[in-house]
Image (cartoon, rainbow, N blue to C red):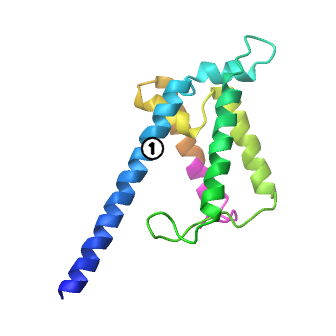
Amino acid sequence: MRMSCVISCENVMKKQFSLLSQYLIGVLFGFGLMISGMSNPQKILNFLDITGPWDPSLLFVMLGAVVVGLCGFYVVSKRSQSFFGGTLHLPAKKEITRPLVIGSLIFGAGWGLAGFCPGPAIVALGVGHLKALIFVLAMLAGMEICERFFTSIPKAD
């Protein structure tokens, strides 16, 4: 009885630590978006406007994100479990499919028109930008429409 309680308590502690770590990583992500200015849609639109007041700073943020992501994938590729002992869920598909291309085009159009992508929109929403609220509501509506009418698109595991 005592041994099962110890194992159960250990599992609860791992789960709590995992949730706390996820929260702290999210805070760090949001903090990075705020510091880099990526929660400001005008900064994004200025990056995309190569004939106007072009702002290349987003390029440096993206390059930094790619370097960190590559390092993360390298570390994960050497492991058989997550840092908290769970199963690793790495992408298995490598082919470029029609839904991927269509979704990418829609995502890019929304990003170019609004100046938001999902992460920065949530951060901007958190600091009270009305435009972010409208964007997030429209994003949720689009997700619901896709879920209801495009059920042939396989869900990620």
Residue 73 found in image quarter: bottom right
Residue 115, position as x, y percentages in the image? 63, 27
Under mark 1, the amino acid is Gly
Secondary structure type for disc 1: helix
Whole-percent x, y for residue 1 in the image? 18, 88
Give the answer, above or below, for where 33 lies relative to 7: above
Q: Which residues are magenta?
A: 143-157
Q: Which residue is mark 1?
A: 26
Location of the C terminus by quadrant is bottom right
Instruction: Residue at the far left: name it.
Output: 2
User: Residue 42: x and y, percent?
Assistant: 61, 19
**Residue 37, image x, y percentages:** 55, 23
Q: Is residue 133 visible?
A: no
Label 1 packing within 10 angstroms: few (<14), some (14-19), many (20+): few
Total labels drawn: 1
* Residue 7 among those drawn in magenta: no
**Location of residue 135 (image quadrant):** top right
Residue at the image position 76 percent from the left and 11 percent from the top:
52
Residue at horizontal 70 percent and vertical 67 percent from the top: 92
The residue sitting at 39% across, 48% down in the picture is 23
Residue at (64% x, 31% y) in the render: 61
